[in-house]
Image (cartoon, rainbow, N blue to C red):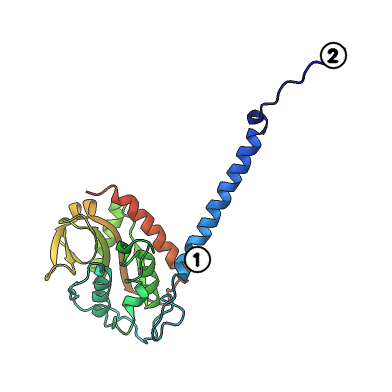
Amino acid sequence: MEKEPRPLKDPYIENGYLFQQRKGRKRKLIALFLCCLIPVCYFVGPPDSGPNRRSGKYYASDAQQKPSALPNPIQGENQTEGHTCGLHSLSAIYKSYSLDPAAADLRFRLGVDRRANPFDATTLGTVQPDILRVVHQDGFATAVLDLQDPVPARRHLQNHLESGHYALTLIRRRQSGNLHWVVISAWLDNELTVVDSLTPQPYTEPVDDFMTNHVLSVMLLQPAVEDASRSIFGNNMRGIQEMKDTYQRMGQTN
């Protein structure tokens, strides 16, 4: 008796599920590898040279200095390079607390002249992970405002400014739309006083419009009451999260 032929196997139906499983596992492994690799690349970076720089920018300054309990009136600095607004803003804050930015090796430790993207020459400047790491190493406590929750964020900012301290702030400039670091130094009659390295004198901005349409990231700084230092990894992770949140807010501002 002649046997009936066996039905042809459909390789897609028979093996497709297993194939998809393997493909899914492979993608997960690749994603996990990248998640582990990015922080490693961020920490290692290219070698640095120069005095007192040991193994790179991540070490604390050798200068034995601590911020004063309250700042002096802040004096803005004049910016002459296109990528140094963060350096000048933070340097002005340091000086107001009687800290010497040069002795703290601030420019080097902030990575101002190191590209965030090694293949893009326009990515020089100062980013949140470096800022949070450096200021904690130098004796400051920080709070990063959640701008997605504007009422408590503004209340926190107002209380901070009225206590005499300053806020390092990333904005989108009215004139050009470019990202730019400034210092918010005061809150008075629903106006914010802004110390800007691109203008010779401080100027004021209306709270509602400025916070809603131009402010992208706010870090409140004040001297730490006690040793509030976090690990380098912890501060960098806080900064990376704030960079992600900033990118999301860029699509929500004018």
The answer to whether 124 appears left or right of 203 in the picture is right
Please tell me whether residue 75 is drawn above or below residue 103 in the rendered image.
above
Q: Nearer the viewer, mark 2 or mark 1?
A: 2
Q: Which kind of residue does numbered mark 2 sit on?
A: Glu
Q: Which residue is mark 2?
A: 2
Residue at 33% in and 59% down: 145
Q: Label 2 crowding class (10 Å Cα cut-off): few <14, some 14-19, many 20+?
A: few
Q: Quote the CA–CA distance across marks 2 and 1.
A: 67 Å
Please identify the quarter of the rendering in which residue 128 is found: bottom left
Query: Is label 1 in a helix, a strand or a loop?
Result: helix
Q: Secondary structure at mark 2?
A: loop
Q: Position of residue 196 (x, y in %)?
A: 18, 67
Residue identified by numbered label 1: 40
The image quadrant that residue 225 belongs to is bottom left
Residue type for callout 1: Val
User: What residue is shown at x 39% (from left), y 84% (from top)?
Assistant: 50
Residue extending furthest front?
2
x then y, percent, for residue 21: 62, 40
Q: Position of residue 49 (x, y in %)?
A: 40, 81
